[in-house]
C-alpha cells in the first residue's frame, strides 16, 4: 500500500502501528464522509463482482468469475470518467503483478457512488502473496494467457491490450514507468515498514520485467 502511494497510484491511506504489543494495520476508509453536523455518512460502493452480477463465491476467474476484459469493459461502460478509471485500474493490475500479489481478484476492486458520480475506488487490500510460499501462485484474473505469477511477461500484457481494447504503446509505457519507479523506490528505502521478503520479491520482479522490455534499471 505504501509503495502504491509512493509511485503515484491512488491508494487508501494505510499505516502499520503496534497497539498493546499487537502489530496492526490501520487503513483510512474512503467510503465514509462527514456531514456538516459531524455525522459520519456511509457512501455506497459496489465491488466488481457485484457490479458485474457475479456472486462472491465466483470472485476468481478460474472459478467462473470476472476476467480483466470484463473489468475494463465495466469501467468503459459505467464509470463517470472511464479514461481516468481505466488508467487507474491498469496501474493496479501492474502493481499486483510487480508485487507478487496473486489475490487481486474482482472483489478487491470497487466502484464508489458519490457526488452523483461513479468512480473506481482507491486501491486497498494490496499484499505480496508470494511472501507466503504456501499460498496459491495462480492469478486471480489471467493476464493474457498467463495463468500464474511466475510466467507473466510483457507479451502477456500485449495480449491483454488486445483483449481489453487498450493501446499497447500506452500500456507498455505505463508498465515501463511503474517498473522503474518501483525499482527506484525500493532501492532508495523510501517505503517504510517493508518486510525483506516483500521488498526483495517486488524488486526482483520489477527488474525482470524491465529486462524483458529492454528498459533501464
Image (spheres, grey):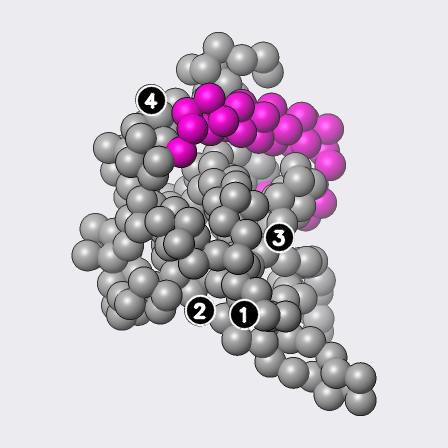
Task: Say which of marks 3 and 1 sits in front.
Answer: 1
Nearest to N terminus: mark 2 or mark 4: 2
| Residue 114 as seen in the image, left or right of residue 94 | right
The disc label shown at residue 11, or none = 3
User: Would you name the residue on which mark 2 appears?
Assistant: 46
Our reading of the magenta stretch's main secondary structure is: helix
Is residue 47 highlighted in magenta?
A: no
Place of residue 148 in the rendered image (x, y in percent of width and height, measured from the top left): 29, 37
Nearest to N terminus: mark 3 or mark 2: 3
User: Would you name the residue on which mark 4 appears?
Assistant: 155
Place of residue 155 in the rendered image (x, y in percent of width and height, measured from the top left): 33, 22
Say what secondary structure mark 3 lies in: loop
Q: CA distance from mark 2 to mark 4?
A: 32 Å
Q: CA distance from mark 3 to mark 2?
A: 17 Å
Q: Are marks 2 and 4 in contact (CB under 8 Å)?
A: no
Nearest to N terminus: mark 1 or mark 2: 2
Q: Residues within 10 Å of mark 1 (few under 14, many from 20)?
A: some
Q: CA distance from mark 3 to mark 1?
A: 17 Å
Specify whether residue 208 is in view. yes
Say what secondary structure mark 1 lies in: strand
Nearest to N terminus: mark 3 or mark 1: 3
The disc label shown at residue 137, or none = none
> Looking at the rendering, in which quadrant would you find the C terminus?
top right
Does residue 67 sit above or below 188 in this rendering? Answer: below
The disc label shown at residue 113, or none = 1
Stretch of the chain drawn in magenta: 166-195
Say what secondary structure mark 2 lies in: strand
Place of residue 210 in the rendered image (x, y in percent of width and height, measured from the top left): 50, 18
- Give whichever of 33, 6 is nearer the camera: 33
Q: Residue at x 48, y 45 (%)?
A: 86
Q: Residue at x 34, y 39 (%)?
A: 164
Q: Are marks 1 and 2 in contact (CB under 8 Å)?
A: yes
Amino acid at each position: 500500500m505504501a509503495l502504491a502511494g509512493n509511485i503515484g497510484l491512488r491508494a487508501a491511506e494505510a499505516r502499520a502501528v503496534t497497539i498493546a504489543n499487537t502489530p496492526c494495520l490501520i487503513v483510512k476508509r474512503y467510503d465514509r464522509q462527514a456531514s456538516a453536523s459531524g455525522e459520519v455518512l456511509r457512501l455506497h460502493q459496489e465491488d466488481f463482482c457485484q457490479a458485474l452480477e457475479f456472486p462472491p463465491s465466483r470472485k476468481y476467474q478460474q472459478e467462473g468469475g470476472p476476467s480483466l476484459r470484463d473489468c475494463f469493459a465495466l469501467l468503459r461502460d459505467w464509470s463517470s470518467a472511464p479514461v481516468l478509471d481505466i488508467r487507474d485500474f491498469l496501474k493496479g493490475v501492474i502493481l499486483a503483478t510487480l508485487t507478487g500479489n496473486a489475490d487481486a481478484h474482482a472483489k478487491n476492486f470497487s466502484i464508489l457512488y458519490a457526488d452523483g458520480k461513479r468512480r473506481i475506488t482507491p486501491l486497498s487490500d494490496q499484499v505480496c502473496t508470494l511472501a507466503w510460499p504456501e499460498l496459491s501462485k495462480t492469478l486471480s484474473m489471467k493476464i493474457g494467457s498467463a495463468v500464474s505469477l511466475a510466467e507473466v511477461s510483457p507479451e502477456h500484457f500485449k495480449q491483454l491490450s488486445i483483449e481489453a481494447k487498450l493501446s499497447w504503446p500506452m500500456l507498455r509505457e505505463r508498465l515501463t514507468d511503474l517498473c522503474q519507479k518501483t525499482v527506484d523506490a525500493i532501492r532508495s528505502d523510501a517505503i517504510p515498514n517493508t518486510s525483506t521478503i516483500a521488498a526483495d520479491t517486488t524488486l526482483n520482479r520489477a527488474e525482470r520485467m524491465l529486462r524483458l522490455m529492454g528498459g533501464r534499471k
